Amino acid sequence: MDKKIPNNTITRDIKNIAEPTGNIYESVVVLYKRANQIAAAEKKELTKKLEDFKSERDTMDEVFENNEQIQISRYYEQKPKPDLVAIAEFENGELFYRVADHEDSREK
């Protein structure tokens, strides 16, 4: 991505979001589905990384003192939210989507 994705929400013009699809509702559905894909991928990645720290006999002391695990969790907390990533991809024309009712494909 060319632009840095903000960690906070920003005000956007609804006309700009509706422009690629011609309909605000279609744009929202595209953003919703892409945000879900990103969230699922991040969750899978985080779960895989945290499985390395899982043990059968964790005590409370071990859980609180695992700095590497804490750093991994903080990294994922600081990443931009999936919906913000999806919006940035949509605005930059990096998403490919199709409308099921129509025969034409739209590449954005």
Image (spheres, rainbow, N blue to C red):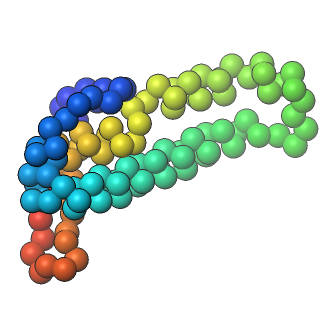
40 lies above or below 63: below
8 lies above or below 44: above
| Quadrant of the snapshot with the C terminus | bottom left
Front residue of this view, candidates 93 and 21: 21
Instruction: Name the residue: 26% across, 43% down.
Output: 87
On the image, which quarter does residue 3 sit in?
Answer: top left
Q: Position of residue 101 (x, y in %)?
A: 19, 80
Residue 93 visible in the snapshot: no
Instruction: Name the residue: 48% across, 44% down.
Output: 42
Q: Position of residue 43 (x, y in %)?
A: 54, 46
On the image, which quarter does residue 28 sit in?
Answer: bottom left
5 lies above or below 102: above
73 lies above or below 67: below
| Quadrant of the snapshot with the N terminus | top left
Q: Position of residue 92 (x, y in %)?
A: 15, 42
On the image, which quarter does residue 68 sit in?
Answer: top right
Instruction: Name the residue: 42% across, 54% down.
Output: 36
Residue 74 visible in the snapshot: yes
Q: Position of residue 29 (x, y in %)?
A: 29, 59
Instruction: Name the residue: 30% across, 45% down.
Output: 86
Tell whether 51 sits left or right of 76.
right
Tell whether 102 sits left or right of 65.
left
Front residue of this view, candidates 82 and 64: 82
Q: What is the total number of numbered labels drawn onto the structure image?
A: 0
